[in-house]
Amino acid sequence: MNVHLTPELEQLVQRKVKTGRYNSASEVMREALRLMEERDQLLKFRKDKLSKKIAAGLDALRRGEGVDGEEFFAQLESREAILRQREPAKPAKPPKEAARRKTA
């Protein structure tokens, strides 16, 4: 099998071989294809997982188990405000201009 690469990709393959990690351009290509297959499998896994979550959510809505969006976001904002109140106050930083004057 012959593969035609752009000059940029050909240079990339040659740089990979020159690092010493690969003995040949064929090894670089095999590794690249293996990684591409691994990425494709990961993307498929994520897509399948997301599809299952969407289906479960739609089933819950059909059973009347949905949550009103406005109510949900109001609760979320309320929880966020409570968490902010619990955080220790951070000391105020002087404005950049005032800081520069002090160091000058």
Image: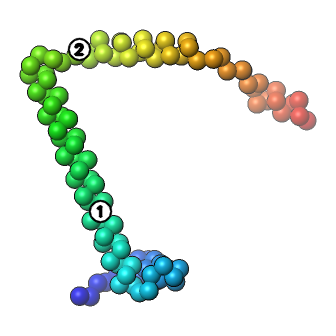
Which residue is drawn at the image coordinates 28% and 54% (left, top)? 42
Which quadrant of the figure contains the N terminus?
A: bottom left
Which residue is drawn at the image coordinates 22% and 53% (left, top)? 44
Circle number at residue 91: none
Q: In 3D space, how far apart are the residues under numbered discs 1 and 2 (Cα atoms)?
A: 39 Å
- Which residue is denoted by mark 2 in the rendering? 68
- Horizontal side, residue 18 vs residue 76: left or right: right
> SS class of the residue under badge 1?
helix
Q: Upstream in the sequence, badge 1 or badge 2?
A: 1
Q: Could you say which is closer to the camera, residue 71 or residue 42?
A: 42
* Residue 82 % position (x, y): 49, 12
Residue 65's place in the image compared with 30, above or below, is above
The answer to whether residue 11 is seen in the rendering is: no
Residue 76: name its quadrant: top left
* Residue 20 % position (x, y): 51, 82
Q: Residues within 10 Å of mark 2 (few under 14, many from 20)?
A: few
- Horizontal side, residue 8 vs residue 18: left or right: left
Hey, what amino acid is under mark 1?
Answer: Glu
- Which residue is denoted by mark 1 in the rendering? 38
> SS class of the residue under badge 2?
loop
| Mark 1 and mark 2 residues within 8 Å of each other at the beta carbon | no
Residue 19's place in the image compared with 91, above or below, is below
Hey, what amino acid is under mark 2?
Answer: Asp
Which residue is drawn at the image coordinates 26% and 17% (left, top)? 69
Mark 1 or 2, closer to the camera: 1
Q: How many marks?
A: 2
* Residue 49 % position (x, y): 22, 43
Residue 95: name its quadrant: top right
Residue 52's place in the image compared with 7, above or below, is above
Which quadrant of the figure contains the C terminus?
A: top right
- Horizontal side, residue 49 vs residue 36: left or right: left
